[in-house]
Amino acid sequence: MMLSAAPIPSDDSAALTQDPGFGLYVHWPFCLAKCPYCDFNSHVREAVDQNRWRKALLAEMEHYAAQTAGRHLTSIFLGGGTPSLMAPETVSAVVGQAKRLWPTDSDLEVTLEANPTSSEGAKFEAFAAAGVNRLSIGVQSLDDTALAFLGRKHSAAEALTAIDLARRCLPRFSFDLIYARPDQKLSDWERELEQALGEGPEHISLYQLTIEENTVFHGAWRRGELRVPDENTAGRFYERTQEILTENGLPAYEISNHARPGSACRHNLTYWRYGDYIGIGPGAHGRLTLGGTKLATRQHRAPEAWLTAVESAGHATRTRTELSGQERLEEMLMMGLRLTEGITRAAFRRELGAEPESLLSLARLEAASREGLVTLNGERIRATDEGRQRLNALLGYLLT
């Protein structure tokens, strides 16, 4: 039974048969300072022994390579923390090791997250020589007052300089901005977006400010010292953001990510298409299909505990859990419905051996379709624009 005869947009038809890929995520947990909104596994240390950490990262890669021999590696993502604090020699060693351990193509995507401080920007050329071909720059704002509020250590001028350096040093780059900040006016955000688009990005990530538990902002919010826009205001920011980016040739391919055709982040598409990926480094998560079983892996979170474990055992895997069919369904929907392309029927068959109608309540699918939140046709299930804006509620409804 088809819930919708909605046509498949021509620009994403290739996704119908596209392999989700196989990625390697490398977590570098160190930062110069902890941002007040950040709940990532990041830590401030006075000194880091680059040689010791380099050896440990390479050792954990070898551990997972032994389990995934012959898998074709399609992307590497160095995240954090602040990977631009890594020595270029460490980056080079990681990229070189990956190419030795797994078959790769000549256009292997290698992304490194970077802060736009002048000291880190000075390393962009060295990162390119180390094998990085895509930078993801944590700009967060082009307004100095907002940057101070967000706890960033760079200025708007430094951010623009870093973007220019990335443009000159690497073939691909992206940068992040945070919007729907306290007291931010929509007109101010429109001007900031206009300035950002003037830099000619092929990819840009735009995140609404969210208050995460165990952050400085969360404490301030609980004490009533920090107020964020209400749901309706945040919705207007989101809708206007989509309009502006689409008008400028960077439509959303995921809730918070926009790109020109062909410029989506391949590594993140592996996550959202529910492909396999290895996670190494403190707190890194992974998803691996071995012998027909999907495993969720997680490494020791504390940097020192991770390092000690790798040096003694060759890896620091804290948990390795077999995912049930229901867990795989939930994860697949949570990731895939974030994408404008949605989830193909082929992906359901590959991952779960069944069609979506046999895995989800048909009555709830039909109700969500009538409300204009989801479409299901002969090729795929996808959340509509309105459905993606209300994705948490939609997922809760479909998975109940």
Image: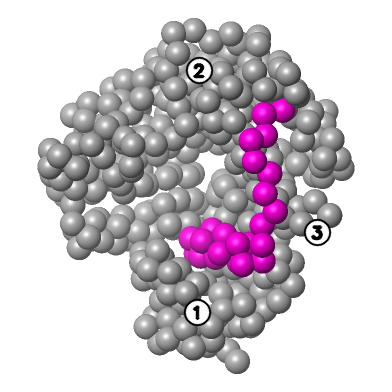
Q: In the rendered view, does 153 fall on the left or right side of 373?
A: left
Cα separation, mark 3 vs mark 2, equals: 38 Å
1 or 2: tag closer to the N-terminus: 2
Amino acid at the residue labelled 3: Gly
Amino acid at the residue labelled 2: Leu
Is disc 1 placed on a helix, strand or loop?
strand
Question: Which residue shows up at 60% across the image and 51% down it?
Answer: 271
Q: What's the mark number on residue 292? A: 3
Question: What is the span of residues highlighted in magenta in the rendered image?
Answer: 315-340
Q: Residues within 10 Å of mark 3 (few under 14, many from 20)?
A: few
Question: Which residue shows up at 68% across the image and 44% down it?
Answer: 320
Q: How crowded is mark 2: few (under 14 residues within 10 Å), some or many (20 or more)?
A: many
- Which quadrant holds the N terminus? bottom right
Question: Which residue shows up at 63% across the image and 19% down it?
Answer: 307
Q: Is residue 235 magenta?
A: no
Disc 3 or disc 2, which is closer to the eye? 3
Q: What's the mark number on residue 375? A: 1
Q: Toward which corner of the image does residue 161 lie, by quadrant?
A: top left
1 or 3: tag closer to the N-terminus: 3
Tell me, yes or no, if residue 56 can be seen here. yes
